[in-house]
Image (tube, rainbow, N blue to C red):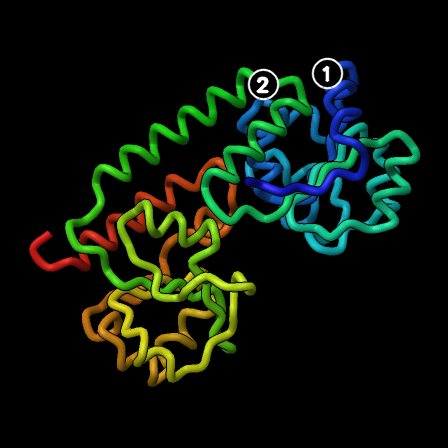
Amino acid sequence: MLRFKLIFLWSIILSSAIAASPLRIVSLAPAITEILATLNLTGEIVGVSSDCDYPETVKRLPKVGAFLQPSLERIASLSPTLVLGMGQPDSPGFRQLQKKGTRVVLFDNPDKIIDIYNIIRQIGILTNRKERASELIRSLKDQVAIIDQNRPTISPAVMVVIWHPPITVAAANTFICDMVKHAGGNNVIEGGYIRYPHIERELMMYKNPTVIIVADQAAADAVRKDVMFQLTPAARRGFIVSDINPDLLLRPGPRFPIAMRRLQTVFRASVPHE
């Protein structure tokens, strides 16, 4: 079950969410901003983190600092009624905002696709967009169901490289690898305490991936020049893939099915006689 941190009691949030008017929202996470935009709430967003760049209209909004280091002073200056974040640690500054009457909700990073649905549902409640949120969730579930039905007959062994060097990969207990599973791949890095662990180069030979997804274009050259990567079946067969938009692959927002369809295309191509 999705765990999320609330700066004040959930019952208070629920009772006041619909009554709060007008909404003035600050979004600290790109995925949250994309969810808000899909719920037709772009006009209610008064500030975003410097990492929020989609849709195009949010680029013109006031910036409140980086994703993991937002400026509480800038946030307060925008007089928000609601601050939404994902993955940011709780801090005394957020509690100060709460004391001044601003609702603050910080969601945990999702581990699975179902967690994304839960975040969308909760944002719908907080912003009086329950019906629109339900429609969005139904649409996403329908898209995932179609992808599920088109899995390749054989699951390729997949490794998702987030960065290199050091070699940083997505473990099985991440929403990225949940997407890999639904698209028909078998992630070769087991789940553990660390979602995105650093691994030794020699593990390439042991895990023997047939498909390597490189999530960041800046790391693609390092991967292709690394001898250990070149010894994998993925390299020999031309399935080191780095052209998937990282915003689609790494952001747990409403555009994730686009990344899943691209993953599935790669997986099907990698399976002989598919």
Q: Quadrant of the N terminus?
A: top right
Q: What residue occupies the far left of the structure in this picture?
A: 273
Q: Quadrant of residue 128?
A: top right
Label 2 is placed on what type of residue?
Answer: Lys
Q: Position of residue 238 (x, y in %)?
A: 22, 68
Q: Is residue 65 visible?
A: yes
Q: What residue occupies the far front of the structure in this picture?
A: 1
Q: Quadrant of residue 171?
A: bottom left
Against 217, residue 111 (above or below) is above
* Contact (Cβ within 8 Å) of mark 1 with mark 2: no
Q: Is residue 40 left or right of residue 69?
A: left
Q: Between residues 63 and 119, which one lies in front from this camera angle?
A: 119
Q: Secondary structure at mark 2?
A: helix
In three-dimensional space, the C-alpha distance between marks 1 and 2, rounded to whole angstroms, equals: 10 Å
Residue holding disc 2: 130
Q: Residues within 10 Å of mark 1 (few under 14, many from 20)?
A: some
Q: Position of residue 170 (x, y in %)?
A: 46, 62
For image coordinates 35% across by 52% down, the residue present is: 180
Q: Is residue 8 left or right of residue 38?
A: right
Label 1 is placed on what type of residue?
Answer: Ile
For image coordinates 27% across by 81% down, the residue present is: 231
Q: Is residue 272 left or right of residue 207?
A: left
For image coordinates 34% across by 32% down, the residue present is: 143
Against 202, residue 4 (above or below) is above
Against 174, residue 234 (above or below) is below
Q: Secondary structure at mark 1?
A: loop
For image coordinates 79% across by 32% down, the residue present is: 9
Q: Position of residue 267 (x, y in %)?
A: 24, 54
Q: Residues within 10 Å of mark 2 (few under 14, many from 20)?
A: some
Residue holding disc 1: 18
Q: Quadrant of residue 6?
A: top right
Q: Is residue 13 left or right of residue 188?
A: right
